[in-house]
Image (spheres, rainbow, N blue to C red):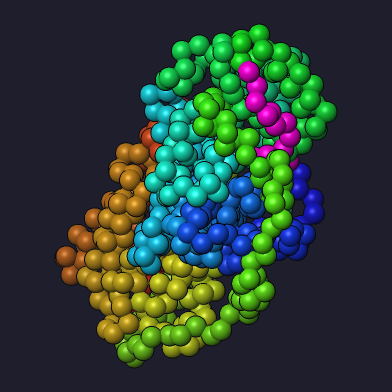
Amino acid sequence: MTRLFNDPAAFADEALEGFTAAHRRWVRPVTGGVVRATATPAGQVAVVIGGGSGHYPAFSGLVGRGLAHGAAVGNVFASPSARQIHSVATAAHAGGGVLLMYGNYAGDVLHFGQAAERLAADGVETRTFAVADDISSAGPEESAKRRGIAGDLPVFKAAAAAAEQGLPLEEVLRVAERAGARTRSFGIAFSGCTLPGADHPLFTVPEARMAVGLGIHGEPGIGEEALPTADEAARLLVETLLRELPEDVADPAGQRAAVILNGLGSVKYEELFVVYRRVAALLGDAGVEIVDPEVGELVTSFDMAGISLTLTWLDDRLEELWRAPADTPAYRKGALDAAEPDPDRASATAAAQDTAVPAAPVVPAASDASRGAADTVLAALDAVARVVDAHADELGRIDAVAGDGDHGIGMRRGSTAAHRAAADVHGLGAGAGTVLTRAADAWADKAGGTSGALWGTILRSLGTALGDRDAPDAARVADGVAEASAAVRRLGGAEVGDKTMVDVLVPFADALAAATAEDLPLADAWDRAATTATAAAAGTADLLPRRGRARPHAEKSLGTPDAGAHSLALITRAVHGALLDHH
C-alpha cells in the first residue's frame, strides 16, 4: 500500500518535483515533465518518452545521455496530455526532429498522436512509436493491439542509442520498429497495487494463487494458477516466451537475446535473483546466448507484487545498440565522456519554476449574450464535477471489473480541474466558448488517459460551436454535441458496439438533434436525450469490449456497463439539472 503522500491528487506532481530535486545532474524540469540537464548536439534526433506516473523508473528515470532526451509524465496511471508532451518535446528538440515513444495504451496513443500533430504544425518533424511487447494482451495475429510493459526499456534504448550516433529521424524510427518487432514480455503477479489515498488494491489474488498475464496499471491477469516455486515461475516465464519467436527467428538455439527480469514493485531483489538463476539456466539449455541481462525494478506498478520477463532477440545492430553506454538517474551502462552542461539550463529551470505562478490568462472579447450563456456553462461544469465526485468510487468499481479501476479517479481529477479553470476565466468576463475551451485543456491536462483526451475533445467541440459572440440556441448546442460525437469517433476510432462511451455519445447526440429539430426548448430536448443516454449506458452491460484496457478481459465485463458510458450518462442527467436551474 502507498503510505507516504499528502493530497492524493497532488501525488504525481510532488513526486516529480522531488525526483528533479534529487537528480539535477541528469534532468531539469519543464512544464509536463523533464528533459536532459546536459546539452544535446545540434541536429540530433530527440527521443521523447512518456506515460503515467506510478511506474518509476519509467519514465522520468530513463532521461539522460544514451537514453531519452525527455520524458512527459502524466498523472497516476494516466497518460500525459498532448499539451504536456508538446511542451517536453519542444524543450528537448535540438533541430533533428522528435521521435515520441510510449507504451501501447489508448490514452497514450491519443495524446501522443495529438502532440505529434501540434509539433508538426510548429514545423518540427515528428514521428511516433508505440511499444507493444506484452504477449498476454493479444495473440500474434493482433500484435499491434498488445500493451507495452517492460519491453519499453530495450526499445527506447535502441532508438536513443541510434539517435546518439547521429542517425536521421527516419532511421531512428526504423531502429525502434526493428527492436519492437523482436521484443516479447510476459508477467505474473501475487497481489495488486494500491493507489495513493486508496484503502484497497486495484485487484486481489486469492491466497496461494497467482495472476498470469497482467498489465502494469493494476489490470487483473488473464488467468490464475497455483502459486509456484521460484523455479516453476522461471519455467513458466521462459517457456511462454520461447513459444512465440519473431518471424525471422526459427529456433532459439544459437540466438542472442537481451534479457530483463523486472520486479513490479514489492518483489525483493534477492527473490528476483533466485528466479533469474533458473531463467538463465533454462535459456542456456535452449541455446540462447544472454547479452547484458538486467535484473531489477525497471518498469513498476507501485507496490504490486509481481515479476515480468522480457526477451529482445538481437541481431548485430541491435546488440551494438543494447550494449551502448547510457547515463540516467535509474539506468547506467558503460562509460561516457564528461557531459557538456546545457547553456540554457539556468534560464530554462527558472522558466519552469515561473510556471508555478502563472500569469493571469488572456481572455478574448465576448458579447454580453455569450457572457450570460457562460453563467449556464459554468453551472453545468459545476454539476458535472459534483456528480462525478459523488460517483467516483462506483465508477472505479465498474472499471476494475475488466480494467485498471482508475476511471473514477481520472474523471474526478479532470472534471474538478475543468470547473476550476472555467471559473477562473468566467470571473474575467469570458464568453461561453472560451470557458469551455479552457475547461477542455484543464480536463485533458489533469485527467490524462483516454478519458482526458476524449473529454477534452468534447468540451473543445462544444466551445467551438458556441463561440464568444452570440447567445447559443438549442440548435447550436445540438450541433456542438454532434461535432463532439464525430470528433471522439475520429480521435479514438471506436464505434457503436465497441463498449465505450461512444455507445452513449452517439445516441445522445442523435436524440438531441432530433428533439431540437422539433423546436423543443433546450432543457426539454436535453432531458429527452439524457433519458436515451441512460438507457444506452445500461445496454453496454450486454456488450463485449473491443477496445481499450478491458479488451483482454472481455468476458469478465459481460453483465457490467462500460465505465465511460456510465459516467457520460450520469453527466448528461446532471447537466439537465443545471439547464433547468438556468432556464
Q: Is residue 567 left or right of residue 277?
A: left
Q: Position of residue 26 (x, y in %)?
A: 70, 57
Toward the top, the furthest residue is 285
Say which quadrant the N terminus sits in. Answer: top right
Against 189, is 22 above or below?
below
Q: Position of residue 239 (x, y in %)?
A: 59, 14
Which residue occupies the foreground of this view, 200 or 31? 31
Against 519, is 335 above or below?
above
Which residue occupies the foreground of this view, 39 or 24? 39
Q: Is residue 410 left or right of residue 576?
A: right
Which residue occupies the foreground of this view, 41 or 282? 41
Q: Position of residue 184 (x, y in %)?
A: 53, 27
Toward the left, the furthest residue is 518
Residue name at image x 79 percent, y 50 percent? 3
Q: Quadrant of residue 178?
A: top left
- The span picked out in magenta is 289-304
Q: Position of residue 505 (x, y in %)?
A: 33, 53
In the rendered image, residue 298 lying in the magenta stretch gets the answer yes
